[in-house]
Image (cartoon, rainbow, N blue to C red):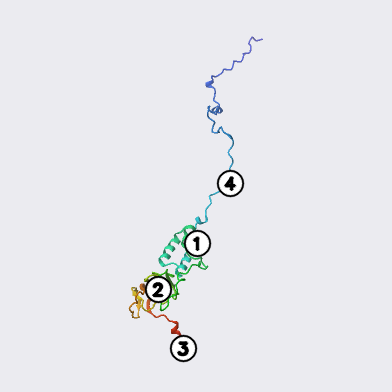
Amino acid sequence: MSDERPEKPLPEQQLPEQQLPQDPLRKRSAPPEGHDGGQGTGPGAGAPLPEVKASEVRAPEVRASELRASDADRDRVAERLRDALAEGRLDMQEFEERLEATYASRTYAELEPLTRDLPAAGGPAAPVPHPLAATPAPGADTPWPARIGGAGTSSAGVAVMSGFQRKGHWTVPARFQAVAFWGGGEIDLREARFEQREVEINCVAIMGGIEIVVPPGVEVDVRGFGFMGAFDQRDTPLPPDPGAPRVVVTGFAFWGGVEVKVKARKTLGGRGDRRRKEL
């Protein structure tokens, strides 16, 4: 038999505490005193935040006026402006300014003010009191001071391969714009009123013609320029009546003409006398 005895197991050597491997969980130690870890100490502290679903998130609402306008929208506005120019609701300068703004507009909000003061397309004009409703229509014996005053009822006439007329009872504005391109226009002032004592009729005739008829006693000043065209006043002007309006004719004629005529207004008595002679 052997005298050797089994060796006793050596006692487990204990490492100093500072040499023990660090537990990663030990880093998340309790917060220091006085710190609540961001959870709060009031009622409901530590409660989870409510969950927000993606379907409940709403995009900011966009008003209709802020939507982008299309080329078709701009073309519709431009067509309404052309109709307004032909009807005398806009003068040439206003038309050009609004047309330029139309094609520069990007949204409906920019287009809407351009036609806000015009009647709806294809619909009747809004009922407005007529500026001459309270005054009688001027006649052949109406004194000139009674025919001066009031707002102009038409500021332009345009004829493009067509014609236009301004005659009867209407009020001539301080400046009237007449355009004839391959067409003709007639401006009759014999029964008209005048916004002010001196008015200007600016004529542009290109391969077209414009005729202006004035009653006797009205002073006419023709200043237009013709290039292969003419501004003509055939009738010998008579001395103007006291207090009568003054009509200044300006503009440009190219292969066209502007003619000024002096004609007396036809009276009912004159027609009646002619009828009696025929009988």
Q: Circle 1 — which element? A: helix
Mark 2 Cα within 10 Å, few/some/many (few <14, many 20+)? few
Q: Distance between the residues labelled 3 and 4?
A: 91 Å
Q: Which of 215 and 3 is in front in this view?
A: 215
Which amino acid does the dot numbered 2 rest on?
Answer: Ala
Task: Identify the disc placed on residue 73.
Answer: 1
Q: Mark 3 points at which residue?
A: 276
Q: What residue type is labelled 3?
A: Arg
Q: Tell whether 178 sits left or right of 28.
A: left
Work out whether residue 136 or residue 274 is closer to the camera in this orientation and state it. Answer: 136
Residue at mark 4 to residue at mark 1: CA–CA distance: 35 Å
The residue under label 2 is 146
Q: Which amino acid does label 4 sit on?
A: Glu
What secondary structure is found at the residue carrying circle 4? helix
Residue farthest to the right, as pictured? 1
Q: Residue at x 58, y 46 (%)?
A: 56
Instruction: Give the camera-side residue of 150 and 30.
Output: 150
Q: Which residue is identified by label 4? A: 56
Within 10 Å of disc 3 (Cα), the crowding (few <14, some 14-19, many 20+) is few
Q: Are marks 1 and 3 in contact (CB under 8 Å)?
A: no
Ranked by sequence position, the earlier of labels 4 and 2 is: 4
